[in-house]
Image (cartoon, rainbow, N blue to C red):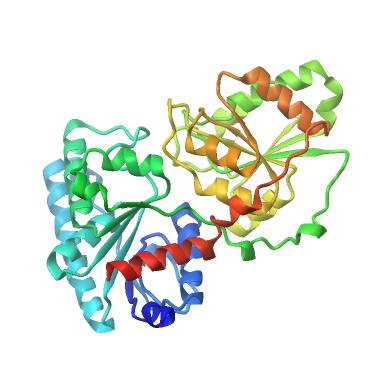
């Protein structure tokens, strides 16, 4: 009976970043869709033309990304009008695709939020059941500065998405509550939580064959930095550790992988300056961006993985990276505010995090890890709920209810 229900689910998946593009959303959907297929669901995927060709055994349609000349993009009324024209044309094409493949569900996977907006318009015009997905907040995003008019427009669009969603998926309860609290009680019931996931099959190194250098302790950080999420507190802790025991300078290696992206407000030049300021040139190694698969190898070969959360009073996000960290089997150490998604995740998993005010405690703990005075044990039962097989089962049950 359960298999019959799954065969009836025929979704249009609006995921505008997909493999082989090396972006977080592309990596996430790259784990999800193969598991959908494994569990009996074969979606029709819509993505941007610029992503390239994804070798996946399901139909993929490509759409252009919305673009305007810079001079027109600065004029808000023109930009809004041209974007509406673009979206309406895309919607007309997608309604034809829905008819062609006899699809009965829309699943939009943001970011970009364009996918949620287009999904909501299709729901209005065609009546197809609609499930939206928020990996990040939109109107409430504390990391994005918006003008008064931009904020007003974003709120209007987000409201449209929530109003038209049969279900709105969020990656944790903090994010769901932050976004949904401003909407009517009836709409709030549509908000559900399905976590980010990891795929055990993605880790190419077998657990018992990972080489370890006893004379070297490797900390690793994978990804970019931002002004409010930068490596300074880790550099301060390392500087303190080495200042207290110079012999450890030969043992510690801190590698930062992939912080050389140009799209953040904390470029690699600022990281290099910090390294010099804290006299860590012989400790920190900067490694250029690598493929997702290569990043997983770095995670597995590390003794301890570092996660740095936002400085805000209470973070809203549980980055997909920390779930990949957990799947690698390496120890994780976090910098995060108390009772944030990151801090609570690490605690449940069996690891530690420290606040931005706990530099001395962080340095002391790092030193004890390096010298082997602390042993950690991962909570596998907690981790299993984040496997892509588990999260897909939750998602497909939800799809069944919606249709």
Q: Is residue 333 left or right of residue 261?
A: right
Is there any visible trace of residue 63 in the rendered image? no
Q: Residue at x 65, y 48 (%)?
A: 379
Q: Residue 287, located in which quarter of the rendered image? A: top right
Q: Residue at x 46, y 71 (%)?
A: 36
Which residue is at the front of the view, 251 or 174?
174
Residue 276 on image: x %, y %: 66, 23
Q: Is residue 69 left or right of residue 343?
A: left
Q: Residue at x 17, y 66 (%)?
A: 89
How many numbered marks have been drawn onto this rendered protein structure? 0
Q: From the viewer's perspective, is residue 299 above or below residue 332?
A: below
Q: Residue at x 16, y 44 (%)?
A: 156
Q: Could you tell me which quadrant the C terminus lies in?
A: bottom left
Furthest residue toward front: 1
Residue 340 on image: x %, y %: 48, 33
Q: Residue 334, located in which quarter of the rendered image? A: top right
């Amino acid at each position: 009976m359960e298999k019959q229900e799954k065969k009836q689910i025929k979704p249009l998946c609006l995921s505008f970043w997909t493999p082989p593009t090396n972006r977080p959303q592309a990596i996430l959907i790259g784990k999800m869709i193969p598991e959908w297929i494994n569990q009996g669901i074969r979606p029709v995927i819509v993505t941007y033309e610029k992503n390239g060709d994804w070798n996946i055994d399901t139909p993929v349609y490509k759409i252009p990304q919305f673009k305007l000349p810079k001079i027109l993009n600065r004029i808000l009324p023109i930009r809004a009008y041209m974007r509406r024209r673009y979206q309406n044309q895309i919607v007309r094409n997608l309604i034809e695709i829905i008819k062609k493949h006899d699809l009965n569900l829309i699943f939009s996977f943001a970011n970009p939020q364009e996918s949620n907006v287009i999904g909501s318009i299709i729901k209005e015009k065609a009546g197809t059941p609609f499930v939206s997905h928020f990996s990040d907040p939109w109107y409430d995003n504390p990391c994005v500065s918006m003008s008064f008019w931009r904020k007003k427009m974003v709120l209007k669009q987000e409201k449209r998405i929530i109003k038209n969603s049969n279900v709105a998926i969020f990656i944790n309860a903090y994010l769901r509550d932050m976004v949904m609290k401003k909407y009517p009680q009836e709409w709030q019931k549509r908000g559900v939580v399905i976590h980010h996931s990891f795929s055990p099959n993605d880790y190419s190194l077998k657990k018992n064959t990972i080489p370890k250098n006893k004379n070297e302790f490797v900390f690793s950080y994978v990804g970019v930095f931002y002004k409010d999420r930068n490596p300074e507190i880790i550099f301060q802790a390392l500087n303190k550790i080495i200042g207290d025991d110079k012999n450890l300078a030969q043992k510690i290696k801190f590698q930062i992988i992939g912080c050389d992206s140009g799209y953040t407000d904390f470029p690699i030049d600022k990281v290099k300056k910090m390294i010099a300021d804290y006299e860590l040139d012989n400790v920190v190694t900067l490694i250029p961006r690598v493929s997702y698969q290569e990043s997983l190898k770095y995670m597995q070969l590390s003794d301890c993985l570092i996660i740095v959360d936002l400085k805000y009073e209470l973070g809203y996000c549980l980055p997909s990276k920390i779930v990949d960290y957990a799947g690698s089997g390496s120890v994780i150490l976090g910098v995060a505010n108390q009772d944030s998604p990151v801090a609570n995740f690490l605690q449940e998993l069996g690891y530690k995090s420290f606040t931005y005010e706990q530099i001395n405690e962080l340095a002391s703990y790092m030193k004890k890890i390096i010298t082997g005075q602390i042993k950690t044990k991962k909570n596998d039962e907690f981790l299993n709920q984040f496997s892509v097989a588990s999260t897909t089962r939750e998602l497909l049950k939800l799809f069944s209810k919606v249709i």
